[in-house]
Image (cartoon, rainbow, N blue to C red):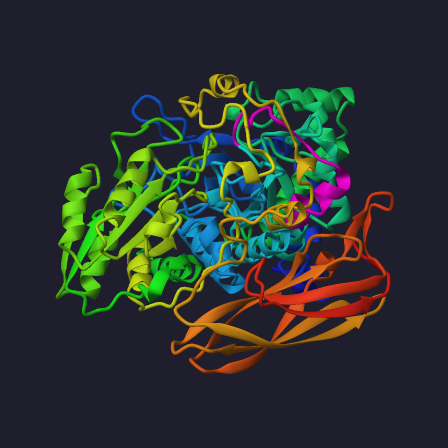
Amino acid sequence: MKRSHIFLMSSMLVSLPNLAFSAEPVWKDTSLPSAERAKALVSAMTPSEKLQLVVSHYAVDNGPGKSSVPKGAVGGAGYVPGIDRLGIPAQQITDAGLGITNPNNIRPGDGATALPSGQILSGTFEPDLAYQAGQVLGKEAFHRGFNVLLGGGGAVLVRDPRNGRNFEYLGEDSLLAGNMAAAQIQGVQSQHVIATAKQFAFGAIETNRMKVDMRIGEKEGRESDLLAFEIAVKQGKPGAIMCAYNKVNGDYSCENSYLLQLPKRNWGYRGYVLTDWGATHSTVKSANAGLDQESGASFDQKIYFGKDLKEAIAKGEVSKGRLDNMVYRIVYSLIDVGAYDHPAYKSDQAENVAADEAISQKIAENGIVLLKNHHNILPLSSQIKSIAIIGGKADQGVLSGGGSSQVTARGGNIVDHTRIQQWPGPVSYFPSSPMKAIQALVPNAKVNFAAGNDIQQAVDLAKHSDVAIVFATKWSAEGFDSANLQLSAEQNQLIEAVAKTGKPVVVVLETGNPVEMPWLHDVDGVLAAWYPGTSGGPAIANILFGQVNPSGRLTTTWPKALSQVPYPYIEGAGKIVNADVLAVKQYSSDNQAVSSVNLNEDGANVGYRWYEQKRLTPLYPFGYGLSYTTFKYKKLILEKDFDKDRHTMIANVTVENTGNRDGADVIQIYGKIPGETTSRLLGFRKVYLKAGETQTVPVPLFSVSLAHYVPVKHSWEIISGNYEISARSDSLSHDALKTNIHLDQIDVQD
């Protein structure tokens, strides 16, 4: 009963003198702000209850006699017992970079929806789809009893095209990555499940990630990775932020006071900061720096936020107020996203699997990128008579990335037993066959498969077919970086041999990063399908046969060679650490290669800005992608509303679909700040146009992208001067519409 509804009549008090009346506790009153409820909860806790909430433990079933699942845990990446007397639910935590992993505690035959890789999601340039992706994650987590996701907001910028986790991230641009992460976070938390923005920060490489020191200046950091996180945190309001393994400017991320205080002091962040599993290194330093929860404590050298924290508080090394703040932030997030009032539970009710997988497929269809289409070989005709499908296990499924984001598909994954089996493996495919999807679209065509390990067999099949579709794969995973940008030599030889048959050849790439294509000029079509998720087969087929007009765009620049990237050589890259997932001591000492990286090399000029600064022409630029129709930009008009309170600008772009097919274009607005030589993405919007249709499309621009960070002021400002604004189809397009506008100096609130 709410306190506002409590009323007592004097006659009742006289007639019932011994009857006790009690109001509902403040923290149960849903009419009150989350902050007030959380504060009341903390006040009602005992010291031991407070300490209970600041440590999570690994909760995975490792088989008979090896279970580490605590009583009450659903099972997954982590578990924090609840406090029943106060109504605080247990924190049931799972990995969820691209879907609910929960691989060791699923029901027989059960699994989850795997979303397409981050390059595909960001490549849609549609925050609405990112929101829908988040909803899928949140719903499927809640259905399985989880209320904390270690995912939903991967805002690490892609600085190097070999990073083993780039497939989890959202590209190289701060504005795009931040906005897409924010939308996905909102989608997750709409389901009463905490989303986590991660990994904070500067995890540009995986090589020696447990100790590598990423060095960067304040201005460079604030205008790159930290800007992506700032947008994600301010707009998305995640319940949690996960600090990273690596060091930043000499201090581990999870005890780095500059990093951990930045969201709380500057961005208005009210949630909590938790560690990555095995990323805690101290008690006093971490707690005082701003770490709120030691997560996956089983992975650490010792439990730092247990009795050691209790002793530190008793000695006055960590204040009682700091512990209260740690706990406050945790329960605030639980209340604010609805996890307190709507506890997750493991349900036996059937999920709407078709709806979730349809969203995954829609994302793939809107984010897969058509890189080459010589003589309009694509889309393929539905009247085609014979098709050769070659390589990539395309008869069985589509490749997925490895590590903690590995989802178990419904019905189980297809494991490549010839490849690595230990973590971060095994190398796995989702059972969504492109070949079967193609057969369904063209039932009258003769569709045959060659595995590709016998080149002559593949060549013979191609010679006797109207078209050859070659699937080429490259596996990426958490814990290591690729040594190079090459496909395997055998795959390159296969593609070159098939191309020499003289038959039309289309290559479908399933990779976690850009790859070199020495055969590019010899094939007719190339599709960057990345890792397309559990509905990847139909998505690829629909694009190849024109059921869907491709509209995905690259969010990572494709270099011609490693000589073009800021860090051409990373010592130790390519070495996979074959360590048991629990053997953190072995894992952290087994790959002591590169010890530090000077990120000031590219600094704030990440990705396409690096190429522009160095006057380098990449293989494919940021924002690039072909369509089965064509678009023309006809007019660009700016509207501005800048004063001390409002910093808004809209670019009105008139665009025409000049082709004979309906399709979608991604309008990209770039700008140059006075005194700088590189362009920045200021805004973007995808527009759907029918054949021959013309629209004037308003594209909101983000003031923070027009600003620069001033270290001496510790704030942002728009400097006075002339700004060049352009509407482009990609970051290097030569048919851009340009205009100039003068802006006066304005301080932008941090």
Q: Is residue 134 above or below residue 645?
A: above
- Toward the bottom, the furthest residue is 693
Question: Closer to the camera, 577 or 391?
Answer: 391
**In the rendered image, is residue 278 in sight?**
yes
On the picture, is 230 further left or further right than 93?
right
Q: Position of residue 744 (x, y in %)?
A: 86, 65
The count of marks equals: 0
Question: Closer to the camera, 144 or 699?
Answer: 699
On the picture, is 419 further left or further right than 281?
left
At x 64% / y 57%, what residue is drawn?
A: 235
Question: Closer to the camera, 42 or 737?
Answer: 737
At x 58% / y 30%, what residue is drawn?
A: 245
Q: Position of residue 607 (x, y in %)?
A: 59, 47
Residue 207 among magenta residues: yes
**In the rendered image, is residue 107 in sight?**
no
Q: Position of residue 455 (x, y in %)?
A: 20, 39
On the picture, is 210 further left or further right than 719?
left
Stretch of the chain drawn in magenta: 206-229
User: Split into 4 quadrants, where in the image is the N terminus?
Assistant: bottom right
Q: Position of residue 298 (x, y in %)?
A: 50, 24
At x 35% / y 46%, what residue is drawn?
A: 519
Residue 357 among magenta residues: no
